[in-house]
Image (spheres, helix red, strand yellow):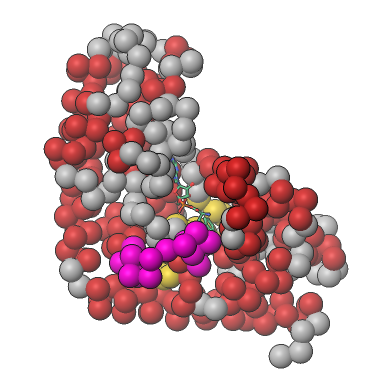
Amino acid sequence: MAGKAFTPRVFSGIKPSGGLTLGNYLGAIRRWVDMQGQGLETIYCVVDLHAITVWQDPAELRAGTREVMAGLIASGIDPERSVLFNQSRVSAHAELAWIFNCVARVGWMNRMTQFKDKAGRNAENASLGLYAYPALMAADILLYHATHVPVGEDQKQHVELTRDIAQKFNHDYGADFFPLPEPVIEGPATRVMNLRDGSRKMSKSGESDMERINMLDDADTIAKKFRKARTDPEPLPDTVEALEGRPEAKNLVAIYAGLADVTPEAVIAEFAGAGWGRFKPALAELAVERLSPISTEMKRLMADPAELDRLMARGAERAEAIARPILAQTCEIVGLLR
Ligand code: TYM
């Protein structure tokens, strides 16, 4: 279908389960902040409905939602310049997700690698929500007619599925209604790996806290985690290409580049030939320099939950104003009398 031109609009989301990691920060939040300055409309969402696809303690979910909200603001998301809210406050997400459950095909869902990873061998016992999760994610994005979705590498397949859902909807209903959004996967650290195993992603849910840097870690903890990070015995090479086959070394260079906002080439130019005894303390120092002002501000914001709730409610009102007419038009196209 000849695509009509959609006004560029950015949407992205983050789950409020288990706190924020350096992976979230470098892979997503940093980019979200950058995109605010590019004259685009930016919409960022704490996706609490996604979190409950795996059981959450209700009190921890409330606390986690506020913590992520605080983390986004402390990292530089401006609740005035961006629309910033939590997903469950805008019920149109769940409503559009149902319609997309009826558009997406079971065969497509079966190919989602993240479901396979998360459900593991016990897939029969996973929630139906965990399986349907990518259709809700498509609804998050398309409810705003978003065209650009800044995410880490691990979300690429879900954004591609969103395009498939948009395309099938447009085709099945003969309406050029939803845009086909682009994943925006940029920067030197689009896939931050686990500090103890360079073949696995850094995630909130990994079993050992030593494998990830949390946004609220203090300076000593950050230094200890980098000191104990797994590496190989070789010093840093003098080209980026020579990092291939050295996943742990490559990961630490990418993290340094992400934190310093430079390319991996620039990091290698500075540290070629350096041993870990030099590089790791430099990396820890840089991480503390970047993260400690953010964690200090996060804690300040978290001390006033009522203000965070007020900001989320205000953001949700603004989100609702964009979402409602799009949901109403979708229902109209589908033939639902309202
Ligand atoms: P979530 O909450 O797992 O992660 C939020 C964002 O952080 C990125 N990220 C990483 N990037 C690099 N390295 C890592 N180790 C790393 N870990 C996490 C993720 O790629 C993501 O961009 N399904 C999504 C949330 C979501 C969403 C959406 C995203 C729901 N609806 C609509 C975009 C648009 C998720 O679980 O992200």
> Which quarter of the figure has residue 260?
top left
Q: Is residue 335 above or below residue 128?
A: below
Left or right side of 179 for 297: left
Q: Where residue 236 appears, x then y in whole percent?
A: 33, 13
Q: Is residue 43 visible?
A: no
Q: Is residue 54 magenta?
A: yes
Residue displayed at 50% across by 67% down: 49
| Viewer-proximal residue among 261 and 96 | 96
Q: Where residue 208 appears, x then y in whole percent?
A: 33, 39
Residue displayed at 18% across by 33% down: 223
Left or right side of 322 for 249: left
| Viewer-proximal residue among 98 and 184 | 98
Principal secondary structure, stretch drawn in magenta: helix
Q: Where residue 110 appears, x then y in whole percent?
A: 71, 48
* Range shown magenta: 49-64
Residue displayed at 78% across by 50% down: 107
Left or right side of 325 for 36: left
Q: Is residue 202 above or below residue 246?
A: below
Q: Is residue 325 magenta?
A: no
Quarter holding the N terminus is bottom right
Quarter holding the C terminus is bottom right
Q: How many marks?
A: 0
